[in-house]
Amino acid sequence: MAKSPLCHPLNCSVIRKFIENLEKIISSNTSVLSSNIEKHFGPSSDTVYLRGSILFINSSTLDIAILAKESLKAISIEKYRFHYMDKHSQMLFRYDDAPHHHELSSFPHHKHVGNRTVPSPQPDLKDVFNEINAIILKK
């Protein structure tokens, strides 16, 4: 049986479509074993805070936190963090936009790899999954 959409396409908010797309990306990834993503809506439903974790077939996990806002029928990501860890909870990489690396050309966006912090554009979940799948397939 087909999964029912969150809302009808003719009256669906941009924020709901954003969530549906994110859920589709997660559910269609064959490396994902399970996911638990909480959705917390702002009072006017034009913002959503998504937080949770995704478990992969190699027992690695991706913790995500995304604060998204709808404005002018578009989504803007106000804050984000994608924190990927191996099965021993050791960080493999983390993308975030915490404003503490002014020296980087991509400020505030950056990526942590080991003990290094490098410039990085803001990734979307598909980019992060592609990177994770490459790591899983390499092992």
Image (cartoon, rainbow, N blue to C red):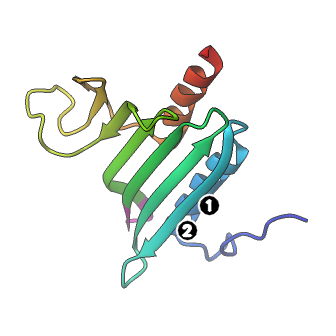
Q: Which mark is residue 20?
A: 1
Measured Cα–Cα span from mark 1 to mark 2: 6 Å
Relative to 94, 115 lies left or right? left
Q: Amino acid at mark 2?
A: Arg
Q: Residue at x 49, y 32 (%)?
A: 86
Q: Secondary structure at mark 1?
A: helix
Quadrant location of residue 59?
top right
Q: Residues within 10 Å of mark 2 (few under 14, many from 20)?
A: some
The overriding secondary structure of the stretch rendered in magenta is: strand
Relative to 16, 119 lies left or right? left
| Residue 14 locus on image (x, y percent) | 51, 65
Q: Secondary structure at mark 2?
A: helix
Asked if the magenta segment contains residue 70, the reply would be yes
Q: Is residue 71 above or below residue 125?
A: below
| Residue 3 locus on image (x, y percent) | 80, 66
Q: Nearer the viewer, residue 109 or 133?
A: 133
Q: Amino acid at mark 1?
A: Glu
Tell me whether circle 1 and circle 2 mark residues in contact (CB < 8 Å): yes
Q: Which mark is residue 132?
A: none
What is the span of residues highlighted in magenta in the rendered image? 68-74
Q: Residue furthest bottom?
A: 43
Relative to 109, 70 lies left or right? right
Q: Which mark is residue 16?
A: 2
Q: Is residue 73 above or below residue 91?
A: below
Which quadrant would the N terminus be assigned to in this image?
Answer: bottom right
Which quadrant would the C terminus be assigned to in this image?
Answer: top right
| Residue 42 locus on image (x, y percent) | 37, 78
| Residue 50 locus on image (x, y percent) | 44, 62
